[in-house]
Amino acid sequence: MTNLYEMNSTPFSFHQIKLNASSFNDSGRNASRDCFTPSTNTNVYDTLYQVNDVVRQVVPPLFLLIGIPGNLLTMAVILRQGMTNSFTGASLVVLAVVDNIFILAYSLPEWLGAVADLDFRDFSNTSCRMAMFFTYISFTVSPWVLVAITVERVVCLVWPFKAKTIFTPKSSLCVHALLFAGAIAVSVYAFEVFEISERALNVYGTACGTFAHLDSSDVTSTVLNHISSGMRFHVPFVLLIIGNSVIFRKLSARINFSAERGDATTTARYRSLSRLVITLNALFFFSMFPLSVYVLIDAQIIDWAFSSSRSDQFCYRLSINRLLFAFCNVMALVNHSTNFLLYFVSSDTFRKEIRAFLMCQKGGGRNLFKN
């Protein structure tokens, strides 16, 4: 059986689709293009491509319209009220910043490319590399900010008196500066491995792809890919699950203790903030889990797709890959665009501050995220 490609690629891994000149000839290239040409036949992959178009064109605007202004409003309200003096408030500002970075650098051009062929990442190698550099920064900072918030919640519940001396404005600045410095350091390689290619366009719908010249069976490539995805997804997943478990257990004990003392105010405050942190972590876990799996198996999926010598089977398998990739991208967009809704729904004070800000009124001066 003839393999159309020797290697594999995805914007979230180190793998490369490397053209096999002896097998992927003009007929093979044309077969790839024919997969995306409207057909009068009612093939299964035609239906899958139509579903893929809906996922890429119709769904993203709903979250783009929520995410971009929502993240900006979150930053404006927290900064307006001086809430960055608290560790949680500063962390939520950073989270809103990196969420918008992801939306503007990845989700927005992905959608523009789907509806109008205006994906600015595909304009040049420079635009491709810059966009993916900022995308990688967002992917790295976002989960570790959640880890930092979760650790702060755990300390507040387990050692409440030490929390005030540990999580100071100075420590907040140091933690977030280190997160950005580390994210920049591990994302610089985007300038080396990303470039414009028709091969990436045929496989993923965007010409901006990774092309590190590494064999897909090479141990180094596999290890680097797993380390990259592990630091952005799997290690934070484990830490957040552990942290959420501790928060839930300690929060229950704290609420019972406060209730026995008749301290309803403290009980409500601890419950509200801790519940918000748990919800943010749950949103991250469920929305990013599909992508965290995809980045580990993308090589096998592409091998499976291009191992077929039949054009109809090849198109069917390629359509499945494109649909999976589009679904993972939409779920990642959900993670980076809906935090504002969580704040808005869970906090009456936050809603009041949003209303005051939009009506140019003086805010209440309350720190929404201080213990």
Image (spheres, rainbow, N blue to C red):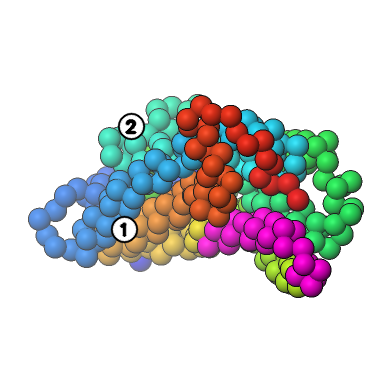
Q: Residue at x 66, y 45 (%)?
A: 368
- Amino acid carrying mark 1 in the image: Ser
User: In terms of image quadrants, where is residue 147?
Assistant: bottom right
Residue 117: x, y in percent? 30, 35
Q: Quick check: 69 left or right of 272?
A: left
- Front-most of 49 and 255? 255
Q: Quick check: 283 left or right of 84?
A: left
Q: Residue at x 52, y 38 (%)?
A: 354
Residue labelled with disc 1:
319
- Front-most of 290 and 339? 339
Secondary structure, magenta segment, majority class: helix
Is there a contact, CB below 8 Å, between mark 2 and mark 1? Answer: no
Quick one: SS at disc 1? Answer: helix
Residue labelled with disc 2:
118
Residue 158: x, y in percent? 84, 63
- Circle 2 residues within 10 Å: few <14, some 14–19, many ≥20: some
- Circle 1 residues within 10 Å: few <14, some 14–19, many ≥20: many
- Amino acid carrying mark 2 in the image: Leu
- Front-most of 20 and 203? 203
Residue 293: x, y in percent? 53, 62
Q: Earlier in the sequence, mark 2 or mark 1?
A: 2
- Front-most of 312 and 173? 173
**Bounds of the magenta segment:** 257-286
Is residue 267 found inside the magenta-colored segment of the image? yes
Quick one: SS at disc 2? Answer: loop
Which of the numbered marks, if any, corresponds to residue 158? Answer: none
Q: Nearer the viewer, mark 2 or mark 1?
A: 2
